[in-house]
Image (cartoon, rainbow, N blue to C red):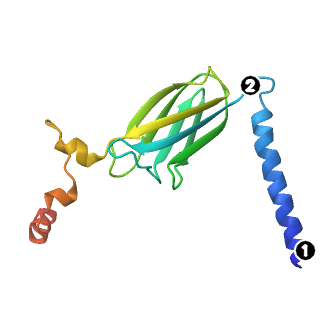
Amino acid sequence: MVLKRIAILSCAVFLSMEWAFAQCMGDWPQPTYRLEGRVMSATGGIEVPGALVMLEGRGTRRRAFTDSQGHFRFDCLKSGFYTVEIAREGYETTREQLDLLSGSLIDATVRMRPLTTISLQPGGNVLSVRQAQIPKRARKAFDRG
């Protein structure tokens, strides 16, 4: 019974690897590119885990989340221009334009500004819920209208 499960799992892993390889080779002989990147906080240089990374360009739209070290990766991309948008609660949404023409592996580091930094700047219009500290009775009155 255990050997049967191992055989089934092995076949599933092999087929998924073959499918992923076939996706990259679908446009052969056109070269494909890999985009790898890291999302960092602009104020302290720490990694930003769990950020949503959206890639758009050349007729493709993909999404990924950063891992615990702030890394993300997109494989099997065609050459051309792409837009990467990165969003995470507590940070300003960041957009970057990338050109995948110069090499097969693009390594990008994107820095995101925390919202608290933005709100402290002159002319900033961002206020967090914690900074507002609205009393419960006032919130109830507001919700009632």
Name the residue beneath numbered marker 2.
31
- The structure residue drawn at horizontal position 11% and vertical position 68%, both measured from the top left corner, is 135
129 vs 23, left or right, is: left
Query: Where is residue 71 drawn, in percent x and y?
Result: 54, 46
The local secondary structure at tag 2 comes to loop
**38, above or below 79, in the image:** below
Which numbered disc, 1 or 2, marks the residue that appears first in the sequence?
1
The amino acid beneath tag 2 is Pro
- The structure residue drawn at horizontal position 17% and vertical position 57%, both measured from the top left corner, is 131
- Cα separation between marks 1 and 2: 40 Å
**1, above or below 74, in the image:** below
Q: Quadrant of residue 26?
A: top right
Q: Are marks 1 and 2 in contact (CB under 8 Å)?
A: no
Circle on res. 121: none
For label 1, count other residues whose C-alpha is less than 10 Å away and answer few (under 14), some (14-19) or many (20+): few
For label 2, count other residues whose C-alpha is less than 10 Å away and answer few (under 14), some (14-19) or many (20+): some
Quadrant (top left/top right/bottom left/bottom right) for the N terminus: bottom right
State how many labels appear: 2
41 vs 22, left or right, is: left
The local secondary structure at tag 1 comes to helix
Residue sitting farthest toward the bottom: 1
Query: Where is residue 81 drawn, in percent x and y?
Result: 55, 23
- The structure residue drawn at horizontal position 75% and vertical position 35%, both measured from the top left corner, is 24
- The structure residue drawn at horizontal position 89% and vertical position 66%, both measured from the top left corner, is 7
Name the residue beneath numbered marker 1.
3
Q: Nearer the viewer, residue 12 or 42?
A: 42
The amino acid beneath tag 1 is Leu
Query: Where is residue 13 drawn, in percent x and y?
Result: 80, 57
Quadrant (top left/top right/bottom left/bottom right) for the C terminus: bottom left
